[in-house]
Image: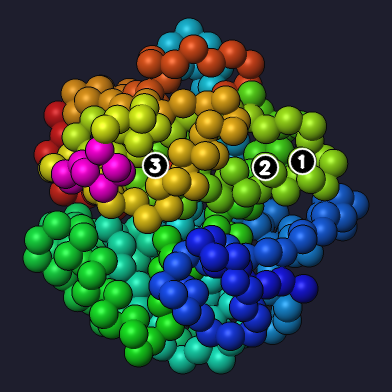
Amino acid sequence: MSTLVCRRTGRRYSSDEPIWCSAGGGLLDLEFTPQFDRARIAQRPPTMWRYREALPIRHDEAIVTFGEGYTPLLPADLGGRTIWLKLEYLFPTGSYKDRGASVLTSKARELGVVRVVEDSSGNAGAAVAAYCARAGVACDIYVPASTSAAKLAQIRATGATLYAVEGPRTATAHAALTAARSCYYASHVWNPYFFHGTKTFAYEVVEQMGWRPPDAVVIPTGNGTLLCGAYLGFCELRAAGFIDRLPRLVAVQAERCAPLHAAWRGGAAPAPSAVAEDTLAEGIAIAEPLRAEQCVAAVRETGGEFVTVTEAEIVAAWRQMLRMGLCIEPTSATAVAALAHCELSGNVVVPLTGHGLKAADKLAAFQ
Ligand SMILES: *Cc1c(COP(=O)(O)O)cnc(C)c1O
């Protein structure tokens, strides 16, 4: 059983209703108790759906999947020590957003939704568009006009209706919100089912480490869909008794757009004060993160920290990864760059979140 709960008022809603926010316009969380059957999990194919009893979809027929997930966890020598790189760019659409899109689109299908709207800086839109194509659900995707050309082409190619919105990322969000008045909002930020997909990142890491938690995870963060998903997943595993502690969660932002970092440090201004200037890390350039409070709380509770990285550091880390044969996009390099800023011991995991071909134009210009 599962119930939608308003984060602000605690009001409860049936998960059979096709809603994505509370009656008062508040963010919803999904209350759901996952089950884990380790013996069955071990026998299933290596996809994120091996944790079937931990995913809040009632009917198998509703599941929308490309067989995604269970991405490699690769040891790599970085800065004189071993870091565990989780290759989250090896997804059907080239980013970990497929985790969220798979669960969210499955839920939409279970609800009988025939059309969705979504907005993103690119990768979430590409993921939702592809899963909707597979599910036969119509979709309208809003993205900033400045998004990498390859991401725009990828979205358009699915047959989704693409709206490239001029102006900042916030203008795109407002356009999508207006459209969502008459359509199911498959938002990776508003919709709680997305986080019940991204949480499988934590399950996989723990299983791949022999059902032990890592000591730290370093995550590029804008709206916090991987950060909050990972936190949820680790918390669920702890509640189920599979791990006895949470890894430290280190959230990384581009120095040029770091409102969560400011909120965490307790700066004077509330979170939405930062301006999304041009940064190479377009995937995390979020000036007004909706779940700011939740992101900061997750980092605090795990004893983690927020780290910012400069454009020069992003370029250097990106080059280092490319030279190692890891074709990632610049946004993903922020987490690698952050390693130099924090003292982390034990097993450290860095997700490499997006594929380099997403940024084909920047890649082509790269020396
Ligand atoms: C979405 C995304 C992230 C994380 O962004 P959030 O806004 O925190 O969800 C990181 N890297 C890439 C490549 C992404 O697409």
Is residue 180 placed above or below 92 in the rendered structure?
below
- Disc 1 on helix, strand or loop? helix
Q: Residue at x 45, y 67 (%)?
A: 26
Q: Badge 3 local density, few (<14 within 10 Å), some, or many (20+)? A: many
Residue 356 visible, this angle: no
* Location of residue 280 (image quadrant): top left
Identify the magenta region: 269-276
Q: Which residue is mark 3?
A: 221
Q: Amino acid at mark 1?
A: Arg
- Whether 243 is drawn above or below 176: the answer is above
Q: Main secondary structure of the magenta part?
A: loop
- Secondary structure beneath dot 2 equals helix
The residue to which callout 1 is attached is: 238
Say which mark, if any, is on residue 7: none
Q: Earlier in the sequence, mark 1 or mark 3?
A: 3
Question: x, y (%) of residue 323?
Answer: 33, 26
Distance between mark 1 and mark 3 Cα atoms: 23 Å
Residue at 54% x, 22% y: name it.
83
Q: Are marks 1 and 2 in contact (CB under 8 Å)?
A: yes
Rendering colour mode: rainbow
Residue 246 x %, y %: 67, 32
Answer left or right for 58 relative to 325: right
- What label sits on residue 234 in the rendered view? 2
Respond yes or no on whether mark 3 lies under 8 Å from ligand 1. yes
Helix, strand or loop status at disc 3: loop
Q: Quadrant of residue 347?
A: top right
Which residue sits at x=77%, y=41%?
238
Quadrant showing the C terminus = top left
